[in-house]
Amino acid sequence: MTFGQVIASARKKAYLSQKELASKIKKEDGQPISPQYLNDIEHDKRNPPSPFFIDQLAEALQVAPEYLYYLANELTSDIRDTGADPEKVVAAYNAFRKVIRDS
């Protein structure tokens, strides 16, 4: 499933309209996102949003943020900002691949 499909499915499962969910997701200035912006995300007409929005969507929809980050091709800030050395990054990706393949 795509990022947008997961958001749409989780929203419907939570019995929220696009308008209701959009009102829960705030921009940096504190204003809610528009239902049209959410519609565009759900229909994959926009790239997955910033980590700021991903965290809010995960909380509002009770979806693991890690899964949304995975679908958005993003790393969480606690991982991205570690300054890990290249060998550790490669080892982590290899472990991740193994877990995904073996499931």
Image (cartoon, helix red, strand yellow):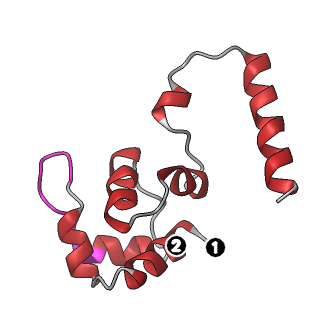
Query: What residue span does the magenta drawing correspond to?
Result: 27-36
Q: Residue at x 53, y 66 (%)?
A: 3
Image quarter (top left, top right, bottom left or bottom right) of the C terminus: bottom right
Residue 64 at what x, y percent from top left?
49, 56
- Residue 87 position by quadrant: top right
Q: Residues within 10 Å of mark 2 (few under 14, many from 20)?
A: some
Query: Between 66 and 35, which is closer to the camera in this rendering?
Result: 66
Residue 54 at what x, y percent from top left?
40, 53
Image quarter (top left, top right, bottom left or bottom right) of the N terminus: bottom right
Q: Which residue is mark 1?
A: 1
Residue 28 at what x, y percent from top left?
19, 45
Q: In the rendered structure, which amino acid carries the disc numbered 1? A: Met
Q: Is residue 37 left or right of residue 29?
A: right
Q: Residue at x 44, y 76 (%)?
A: 10
Q: Residues within 10 Å of mark 1 (few under 14, many from 20)?
A: few
Badge count: 2
**Which mark, by number, is residue 6?**
2
Q: Is residue 68 above or below residue 46?
A: above
Q: Is residue 17 left or right of residue 97?
A: left
Q: In the rendered structure, which amino acid carries the disc numbered 2? A: Val
Q: Let me know if residue 10 is in the magenta part.
A: no
Q: Secondary structure at mark 1?
A: loop
Q: Are marks 2 and 1 in contact (CB under 8 Å)?
A: yes
Q: Is residue 99 left or right of residue 81?
A: right
Q: Residue at x 34, y 57 (%)?
A: 59
User: Of the residues under marks 2 and 1, which one precedes in the sequence?
Assistant: 1
Q: Let me know if residue 28 is in the magenta part.
A: yes
Query: Between 47 and 70, which is closer to the camera in this rendering?
Result: 70
Q: Secondary structure at mark 2?
A: helix
Q: Is residue 9 above or below residue 88?
A: below
Taken as a whole, is the magenta stretch helix, strand or loop? loop
